[in-house]
């Protein structure tokens, strides 16, 4: 039987959780999965765990990056190595229910117009409490409507960890290395090729990253002051100039909305008064955008 699915596991200093994540893939009811761990130059015991898993399980392979690539290039590395029709990532601290791959694959195989399928996702906060992800909602309308809906509310973007058609994902993945918003550019880009489905059961559990960690990432990884105050600028450039999204009014309004929202979120951590005024104007005077798909133009 031809292997249909590759699961890429990007790892960095994940010795404490990597085995749990990989074993949740090995327990899948769909047995024909390749599992590729890419260790991004970890300084803890990740290498030993990865080598042990590869030695013990035939479907598992392990690659150690000699230098730290960073999150986006490490995700890209795993994707570029894949030659199966379907691909997904699993973070080193996340886990899957045993039927995850089987059920996502069945949905994608049943409809050639779908490019991504994701289940509902439960996030575990650092204090142990949980919440359901808001970023897995289906996108089943036409291309313009789907793009406008997604960019209006990408939320936690848990859909990135769904099962995808490999060829589409490889086309959509940003070719330049920017950290903030690369995953939003990626998922928006896949909508140029098809629709996204959601399985309504919770079949994935993820560790939640505190919001403050994202603010730190913006401060440390932005290339200059302009990207600090407009963190979504690299994402917008990728979508407009490389992926050439349709520049229809609903899409442009949604793109502006997400840029302003992230601007006020970051600047608000330093200038709360300015952000409060800006959010008020954005919410009540300018940008009353729908955040879920509706019938619209193609």
Image (cartoon, rainbow, N blue to C red):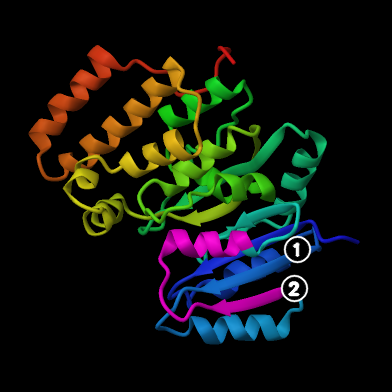
Using the image as rendered, state which of residue 65 and residue 106 is in the foreground: 65
Q: Position of residue 253 (x, y in %)?
A: 37, 20
Please name the residue shown 67% across and 76% down the image.
Answer: 61
Q: Which residues are magenta?
A: 60-80
Position of residue 271 in the picture relative to residue 75 (left or right): left
* Mark 1 to mark 2 CA distance (whole Å): 7 Å
Q: Residue at x 42, y 83 (%)?
A: 44
Answer whether residue 78 is magenta in the image: yes
On screen, residue 1 versus residue 44, left or right, reads: right
Query: 83 above or below 12?
Result: above
Q: Does the magenta segment cover residue 21?
A: no
**Contact between labelled residues 2 and 1, with CB atoms less than 8 Å apart:** yes
Q: Which of the 4 image quadrants contains residue 87?
A: bottom right
Of the residues under marks 1 and 2, which one precedes in the sequence? 1
Taking the spot 47% from the left edge, 24% from the top edge, the residue there is: 148
The residue nearer to you, when weighing 138 against 176, is 176
SS class, disc 1: strand
Q: Nearer the viewer, residue 181 or 32?
A: 181
- Residue 53 occupies quadrant: bottom right
Residue 33 is tagged as 1
> Alpha-carbon neighbours of circle 2 within 10 Å: few (<14), some, or many (≥20)?
some
Residue 15 spot, x, y in % from top left: 48, 78
Q: Quadrant of the N terminus?
A: bottom right
Q: Position of residue 257 (x, y in %)?
A: 33, 26
User: Is residue 107 in view from this perspective?
Assistant: yes
Give me the disc on residue 59: 2
Which mark, by number, is residue 219? none
Furthest toward the front, the residue is 241
């Amino acid at each position: 039987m031809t292997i249909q699915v590759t699961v890429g596991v990007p790892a960095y200093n994940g010795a404490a959780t990597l085995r749990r994540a990989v074993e949740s893939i090995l327990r899948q009811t769909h047995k024909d999965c390749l599992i590729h761990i890419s260790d991004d130059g970890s300084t803890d015991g990740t290498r030993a765990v990865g080598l042990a898993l590869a030695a013990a399980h035939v479907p598992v392979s392990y690659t150690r990056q000699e230098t730290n690539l960073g999150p986006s290039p490490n995700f890209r590395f795993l994707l570029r190595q894949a030659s199966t029709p379907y691909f997904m990532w699993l973070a080193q601290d996340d886990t899957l229910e045993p039927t995850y791959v089987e059920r996502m694959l069945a949905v994608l195989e049943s409809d050639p117009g779908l490019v991504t399928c994701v289940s509902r996702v439960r996030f575990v906060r650092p204090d142990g409490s949980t919440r359901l992800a808001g970023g897995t909602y289906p996108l089943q309308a036409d291309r313009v409507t789907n793009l406008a809906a997604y960019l209006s509310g990408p939320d936690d973007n848990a859909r990135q960890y769904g099962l995808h058609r490999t060829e589409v994902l490889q086309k959509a993945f940003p070719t330049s290395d920017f950290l903030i918003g690369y995953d939003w550019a990626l998922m928006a880009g896949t909508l140029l090729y098809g629709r996204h489905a959601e399985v309504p059961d919770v079949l994935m559990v993820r560790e939640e990253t505190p919001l403050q960690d994202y603010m730190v990432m913006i401060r440390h990884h932005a290339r200059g002051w302009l990207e600090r105050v407009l963190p979504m600028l690299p994402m917008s450039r990728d979508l407009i100039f490389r992926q050439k999204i349709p520049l229809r009014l609903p899409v442009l309004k949604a793109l502006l909305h997400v840029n302003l929202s992230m601007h006020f979120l970051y600047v608000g951590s330093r200038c709360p008064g300015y952000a409060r005024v800006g959010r008020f104007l954005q919410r009540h005077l300018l940008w009353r955008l729908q955040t879920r798909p509706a019938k619209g133009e193609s």
